Amino acid sequence: MAVIRLIAARLVWAVPMSFIVSAVSFLLVSLIPGDPARSVLGPLATQQQVDTARQQMGLDRPQGDQYLSWMGRAVRGDMGASLLTGIDVAETLNARLQPTLSLILLATLTATVLGVALGLLSAVRGGVLGRLIDVLSVVGLAVPGFWLALLLVSWFAVRWQLFPVTGYTSITDSPVGWLRSLALPVAAASLAAVTAVAKQARDSILDALDRDFVRVMQANGLSRRSIICRHVLRNAAIPVLSLLGVISASCI
């Protein structure tokens, strides 16, 4: 229940935070020097052409009206047309939405499964295995993502030709091709996430194991596996979930 309440609270706070972030972003964009209409039409455009373009773009209205109009259209999914290409922005985003969501989903799933498993092993087993996992976590956080991506493409795509170098295959066209096209991006994007989740999970599990309720359960004869699986992991999940939210956003 604690995890459900935490997720519900985060979702409730996401609504006002979205409006605050959008308002600040809109304000910062409006403070950028220059005239968007003049930039689109070029330096040879007459003042009448610039004024007409400003009116068409809604730039002649007060900032508050511009923001409310922009937010209202964004909520409806109407993002207008690109000033550079003239193509509808929603269509451009939709074309990139499936690859982005696929990458976020697989990278987050990989970070969750591997990170929690490694963190649990490091906390429970300790010894050489625990120290090895700790060292690998530090190394994983230190490796630059772009360097790892180039290395993976060079080895697994160019040299051994196990995965495609570029491109994306939709899951509806070929599930196997979808996995192959995302394997290297997911590996590069999730390495740092796996190590971060492993470290956070390890610290949270060790902290939970040191609490009084664990000692009480041990004194009552409950097995160590039952205590960890039913109680310790549940208490250690809250900080891990918070970290996974940050990781999912960073994958974008």
Image (tube, grey):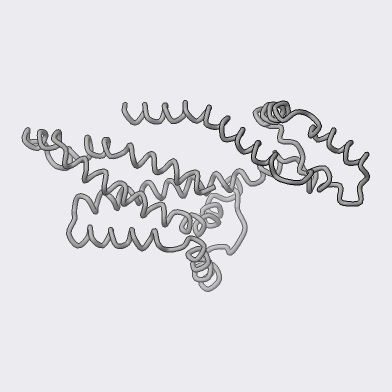
Of residues 10 and 102, the one drawn nearer to the viewer in this rendering: 10
Of residues 169 and 66, the one drawn nearer to the viewer in this rendering: 66
- Residue 220 picture location, percent across and down: 7, 33
Give above or below for 155 relative to 115.
below
Which residue is at 42% across, 46% downward? 109
- Residue 28 picture location, percent across and down: 64, 40
Which residue is at 55% across, 56% downward? 181
Q: Quadrant of the N terminus?
A: top left
Q: Is residue 72 left or right of residue 246?
A: right
Residue lying at the far bottom in this picture: please name it. 159
Give above or below for 165 relative to 120.
below
Q: Is residue 155 left or right of residue 194?
A: right
Q: Is residue 228 left or right of residue 63?
A: left
Of residues 24 and 18, the one drawn nearer to the viewer in this rendering: 24
Which residue is at 24% across, 44% downward? 205
Which residue is at 69% across, 26% downward? 68
- Residue 94 picture location, percent across and down: 66, 41
Q: Quadrant of residue 5?
A: top left
- Residue 88 picture location, percent across and down: 75, 40
